[in-house]
Image (cartoon, helix red, strand yellow):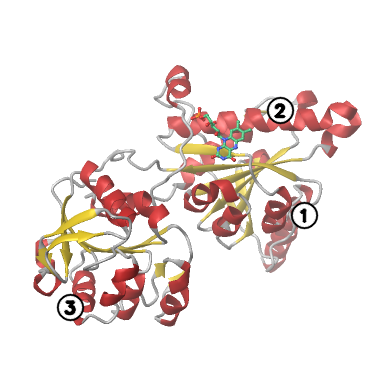
Amino acid sequence: MKRLTILGIILACSVALCMGQRRSRTGQQKIIQLTEPNLAGTVSFEQAVAKRRSVRQFSSELLKRTQIGQLAWAGQGITDPQRNLRAAPSAGEVYPIELLFATHEGLFAYRPADHSLLETSDQDIRVRLAAAAASTRDSVAGAGCDIIVAGSSRKFAKRFGAKARTYTYLEAGHVAQNIQLQAVCLGLGSVTVGDLDSAAVRKICRLSRELEPLYIICVGHPIGGGATEGQTDAGGKRAAFIIASANFRDEELFATKLVLDSAQVQTVVASTRTGIIRGERGGIADARVLVSQLRVDDYDAIIFVSGAGAVEYAANPDALNIARETVRKGKVLAAIGLAPTILANAGVLTGVRATSYLSERQRLMQAGALYTGLPVERERLIITASGPTASAQFGRAIADALTVSIR
Ligand SMILES: Cc1cc2nc3c(=O)[nH]c(=O)nc-3n(C[C@H](O)[C@H](O)[C@H](O)COP(=O)(O)O)c2cc1C
């Protein structure tokens, strides 16, 4: 039995090397068998083509393994087992394209031969990948799955000489198009990212020199995509935004509120004073509730917004008690930008995956949070976000958390 396990690991490692990936640091590699692809989707080809649009902002909902398997199959799956032919065409049937899937669970190489995923790392590399795709950073960091499309023109060189590189690039396009259309059929959004630092991506994914990263395809649940099958929307729920009495961060309130408004969540603004309050950028909010009188029982979600003025809540006993009571009562607690520090100070982030504006990282970690640096993090009903640019995604994560499953 032990010999068999060792043989399995050696086999996995040699397969990884054949595919151009280096061994994981531990040398232990998991193989995940994917379920058979669905060949009877309900969206027509014409509908998929008509509906496909680049999507760059995603909700925090994770992708299911069946969805990842379906995307892998559409890109490189074997569709003619007798002749070993794949879903996307390949000059001379050389198949120089490799697909890697970066998710919250790690990095996985797709193996068309047995429709499985080989784990090449158990680390979530999405934030590091994002740094290698600067102009599309938030999409790469925020996608449920980043698919790295890498090509080996060397595989073509012998047969096609000077055409090798062109053919590799053309094939990456075929594969990416299949994946994007499959994403539409699954109700997912995607964007192909060509503006990337290939050398950096190769290093992060620990690919061999032979493989050139050509694309990252970010795939996820589109923001504002509506409720998925088996779910109702968050309509009728109530949320309170807690903002500073001066200098709140405008986008964090307004862009988040916009998403909640469209999900029919009723919102109210609370602060340490009532009346008109100006944001850092001149926006106007009307605070109707005093933080000292806010009753957590009246709301389904409490949302702390930041901005320079939010420091007033860092040690405010009312604010800290509200955060603690919200968690105790099983309601949604959210904070963005500098405000996750309020949650840390309330002691509710211990052992919780969280994010914030980078300046707060140390404070969160000292409070026992598992800091990820992602645009948005959700663990159970605690949602945190990195700052203004993540506001819409933050709003969507709150709406998702307020959504009641009726399954
Ligand atoms: C080769 C190629 C590279 C691309 N690179 C990026 C990119 O780096 N970042 C990005 O946001 N979109 C990228 N895109 C997506 C295009 O911006 C997008 O396709 C275009 O705006 C048209 O919109 P549509 O995809 O919704 O039709 C790329 C598309 C292609 C075909």
Nearest-to-viewer mark from 2 and 3:
3
Confirm if mark 2 falls within 8 A of ligand 1.
no
- The residue labelled by disc 2 is 170
Tag 3 secondary structure: helix
Q: Earlier in the sequence, mark 3 or mark 1?
A: 1
Give the residue at x 54% y 51%: 137
Mark 1: amino acid: Ser
**Spatial distance from mark 3 to mark 1, Cα to Cα?**
59 Å
* In the rendered image, the vertical position of residue 197 relative to residue 342, given as above or below: above
Residue 178: x %, y % from top left: 57, 29
* In the rendered image, the vertical position of residue 194 relative to residue 298, given as above or below: above
Report crowding for label 1: few under 14, some 14 to 19, many 20 or more residues within 10 A (C-alpha). Answer: some
- The residue labelled by disc 1 is 14
Q: Earlier in the sequence, mark 2 or mark 3?
A: 2
Residue 117: x %, y % from top left: 60, 48
Give the residue at x 37% y 50%: 393
